[in-house]
Amino acid sequence: MITAVKSMLLTNWHPLRWVALFISLMFFWNAYTYDSGMAAVLGAFFAFQTITNTGCLVGSCAGGSCSPNVEKSTSQPIDDVSFDEIEGDKK
């Protein structure tokens, strides 16, 4: 377990992850300088995402599940599509 945590913390440091770390440090600096609790919460949020390499900020999108599931349909092609016109108030 220790090696898994160590691997998660020390590998896959791409440029956007460094930017997220910088953002979290700026929020912590703001929280310290201006005694802002909200900045501390945001700093902790960004720091957690950066350290654990999760969330869409650092590009992993909650474990890499942000790419859409595109599957081509093998069913029959759609030949005729009908549309209903919706009329609204004309000014």
Image (cartoon, rainbow, N blue to C red):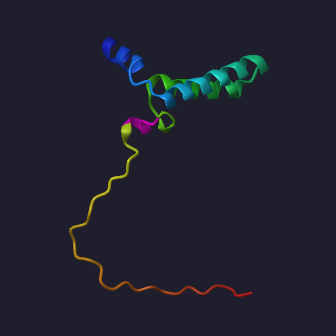
The picture quadrant where one finds residue 83 is bottom left
**Magenta stretch, overall SS:** helix
Q: Is residue 40 left or right of residue 62?
A: right
Question: Taking 16 as reference, is 82 above or below it?
Answer: below
User: For this rendering, which residue is in front, 44 or 10?
Assistant: 10
Question: Taking 74 as reference, is 84 above or below it?
Answer: below
**Which percent across, then down, holds residue 53?**
44, 28
Residue depicted at 22% across the width and 76% down the height: 76
**Which percent across, then down, holds residue 31?**
71, 21
* Quadrant in which the N terminus appears: top left
Question: Taking 16 as reference, is 2 above or below it?
Answer: above
**Which percent across, then down, holds residue 13?**
44, 24
Q: Bounds of the magenta span? A: 59-63
* Quadrant in which the C terminus appears: bottom right
Residue depicted at 52% across the width and 87% down the height: 85
Q: Is residue 48 left or right of residue 1?
A: right
Q: Residue furthest front?
A: 15
Question: Taking 15 as reference, is 33 above or below it?
Answer: above
**Which percent across, then down, holds residue 28?**
66, 20
Q: Residue furthest right?
A: 34
Residue depicted at 32% across the width and 17% down the height: 4
Q: Residue furthest top?
A: 2
User: For this rendering, which residue is in front, 69 or 10?
Assistant: 10
The picture quadrant where one finds residue 63 is top left
Q: Is residue 4 left or right of residue 84?
A: left
